[in-house]
Amino acid sequence: MTPKSEHLSEALHAYLVAQGMTPDPIQLDLIAETQAALPDQAGMQIAPEQGAFMTILTRLIGARNIVEVGTFTGYSALAMARGLADGGRLLCCDVSEEFTSIARKYWDRAGVADRIDLVIAPALQTLRALPTDAAFDLAFIDADKEGYVDYWEEIVPRMRSNGVILVDNTLSHGRVIDESTHGSSSVQGILRFNEHARTDARVELVLLPVGDGLTFARKL
């Protein structure tokens, strides 16, 4: 099954995707390989409509410097790399050689591998080693939910004014409003992050019903 925004039926999702930037053969192959090679983790891949949104947004803001926390098999990185301004760079932070080995193949096929710097290490370690000046135009957080607040705190000071931060899975499959699931460390991480970001005076934000919930924040 193609990943999709959760509240959409299969038929409505197919219509929605067909009316916009539809996945090309490289993206379709990446979806298929992810599902075949990693059936238990394939749900971690973003939906095609989210990827299209991220490509357009990257182009719209003229992003030249992007950071991603949590790369998985590379669909989101591919989407953003395709939208980078000339000479732009995308820093990808992940801990899995297995997952990102798939990503590298498709970045090569798409001709964007030369724009992407992949660091295999704990993301906090990578982020804390970066300069502290406001350099990033766009950031995407899609990793372990327990770490979201920590990633946010490293990224926000490094965003330029009017830079955009996207944070994935902030509806947690609807579990944010299901108290019977609130004992989960993952759900607790999302609840803690959502409240932390909502009250952060450094940004303004909206939570969009895209994928499994996508928080869209603008650095003031």
Image (cartoon, helix red, strand yellow):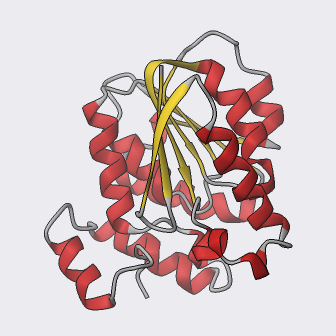
Q: Which residue is drawn at 37% across and 27% down?
A: 63
Between 142 and 172, the residue placed more toward the observer is: 172
Between 76 and 188, the residue placed more toward the observer is: 188
Q: Which residue is drawn at 72% across and 30% down?
A: 153
Q: Residue at x 18, y 80 (%)?
A: 15
Q: Is residue 144 visible?
A: no
Relative placement, left or right, of 137 versus 176 is left
Query: Which quadrant of the figure has residue 40?
Result: bottom right
Q: Can residue 217 be seen in this view?
A: yes
Task: Look at the picture and state if 126 lies above or below 82.
Answer: above
Task: Look at the picture and state if 2 lies above or below 154.
Answer: below
Where does residue 145 sit, x and y in percent of width and height?
A: 74, 57
Where does residue 54 sit, x and y in percent of width and height?
A: 37, 48
Query: Which quadrant of the figure has residue 120?
Result: top right
**Quarter the N terminus occupies:** bottom left
Q: Residue at x 86, y 73 (%)?
A: 183
Relative placement, left or right, of 208 versus 180 is left
Where does residue 27 sit, x and y in percent of width and height?
A: 36, 66
Residue furthest top as drawn = 133
Relative placement, left or right, of 61 versus 18 is right
Task: Look at the picture and state if 160 lies above or below 84.
Answer: above
